Image (cartoon, helix red, strand yellow):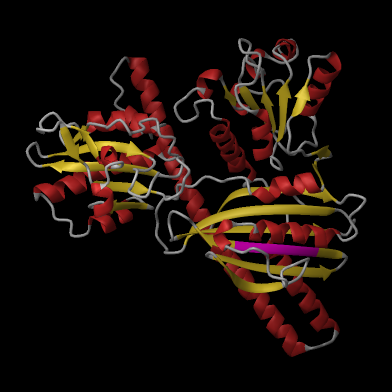
Amino acid sequence: MRTIYRTTFELRAGAQCDDFFGSFADAAWAWLYDRRELGLALKPAGMSGAVAIPATDVGGGFRAEALQVEANNTRGWGLMVSQKDARASDLLWVSDLALIREPDGKHYFSFTQSLGRTDGGIMPIRRTPGRPRIIAKLVKQFIASSGGLRLHSRPLPLRHTEADLKQFIALLERPERTHPIVLVSIHRQSGKPLINPGEMADHLSGIAHVIVAESAEVANNLSRILPPWLTCFDGAVRVYWPGFRRISQTIDHRLWTVRDLSADHIQFNSGRFADLVLASIAEVTVNSISPHYCSFDRLQSLDRHRVIAAAKDNQEWEKLALAYAADCEAKDAAIVSLERELKSVSESLFREQQLTVALKAKIEDRKAGRANDAETQLPPESVVEAIERAKQQYGDQLVFSLNGKSDEHSPFESPSEVQAAFEWLAVVYRDSKTGTKSCPDLDKNLRETITGWHYSAHQNDSTARSHKAKEWYQCPWSASPTGKLEIHEHIKCGRSRDAEETIRIAFSWEPKIQKVVIGFIGQHQRNAHTN
């Protein structure tokens, strides 16, 4: 399993909360059971409060286990939930949340989200973390803080008064600060943020502080205090990491300018940008573990040590031997898990190193005035770019003749997968059609080539004959007497209503020119049952 999201912060109950662990556990159970996938009107009666529950299938592909521990002035309760990925059944998500009361009486909440393969395959996993709904719920329901600073699910305003600016600088430089600060500036021409700060704050709750300037003057005043390379202005958004110093370099604290926010993969969409910022912060936080971090594994370890201590005190030697054996077995399993995670991280590091090499080559090509030979080694940043590259690289194999229902600007989150899909059409599919190389099962081949993708050779008859859906399954083709070409074959990824997770490419083989004609790219094609 590879950890892709982690956060830890202190939680305090309000004055009206008599049973902190019970209230926390109820929030966790509600988070688990408030899902359409489970199809439950009410959660099971036994799953309420801080109770221990053995590993149980709860429906919809979800499995849950709960544990409570009390030993050595420490109390803890945890819930571990696993579920199969919606797009690829060989991927497993594991969510691990825990609340621990340490000997000093303070309570700390931790949440960890991991992802791994269940088939033992060695292939890249293209998934980004999302903000679990329970994080914002807990931040709102209880008093959350970290490093002595209150955490919020809403943005905090920054006015252009001297007092506010001094307080903001003190916050940036505060040694105890543990969470990054995301500053959203005001676009001078429009007089407002280019990204919705409320959506950003809710999305980043528990993992960052979001602060929004109240006017464009804030940036002017900050520029008199901070070096120009560390300011944030004219609609830009910046992440200020803990450990900030005024001598820090520009690259130490990521800045997204108006140009960045207008890029094809963002297009000033607050949701997409919040996902992007969350992913960039989570990539750092997974490697930064708080001294108060607690996991389901740690709670299990505490419980085993409690059993060992009790067996020693009671001189129950057989029970002690069994307890030690169970502890050793658990530690062995933890080592195997860490080795697998190290392997996954190493694979990711290798991909990043390859990307760095390609970027350096691109820079050198530009400096020398050479053609950008390294350009094609870089992953495309959008579906539009993937299409343009395919036109250049596979002009002898592919023809793009998109119909009016296509969306070239699809926000699909993995443009590199779209590029790989075009390559599959140009090589594997085309070779099977020309007889160059046989491929008995195109769907299986595509699934093994690009995880989560599928091939279909046709549409069902009702859809094909449907008048209202017909224009979705035709594309312009001047060589045809009707000026149209039927496109009933398709490859696709995802089945959700989210365009960032779902894409379909419809096409047809044209034997006269020995090329694949791509006539539709978008989230879904209308069918006979679509309004």
Q: Is residue 205 or residue 411 the one in the foreground?
A: 411
Q: Position of residue 224 (x, y in %)?
A: 74, 10
Q: Can I make out residue 245 in this image?
A: no
Q: Can I make out residue 466 in this image?
A: yes
Q: Residue at x 34, y 21 (%)?
A: 365
Q: Position of residue 189 (x, y in %)?
A: 61, 10
Q: Position of residue 147 (x, y in %)?
A: 80, 40
Q: Residue at x 45, y 44 (%)?
A: 501
Range of magenta residues: 76-81
- Give the prevailing secondary structure in the magenta stretch: strand
Quarter occupied by residue 499: top left
Q: Is residue 123 or residue 155 the one in the foreground?
A: 155
Q: Residue at x 62, y 57 (%)?
A: 95
Asked whether residue 77 is drawn in magenta, I would say yes
Mark count: 0
Q: Is residue 188 left or right of residue 490?
A: right
Q: Residue furthest left?
A: 512
Quarter occupied by residue 227: top right
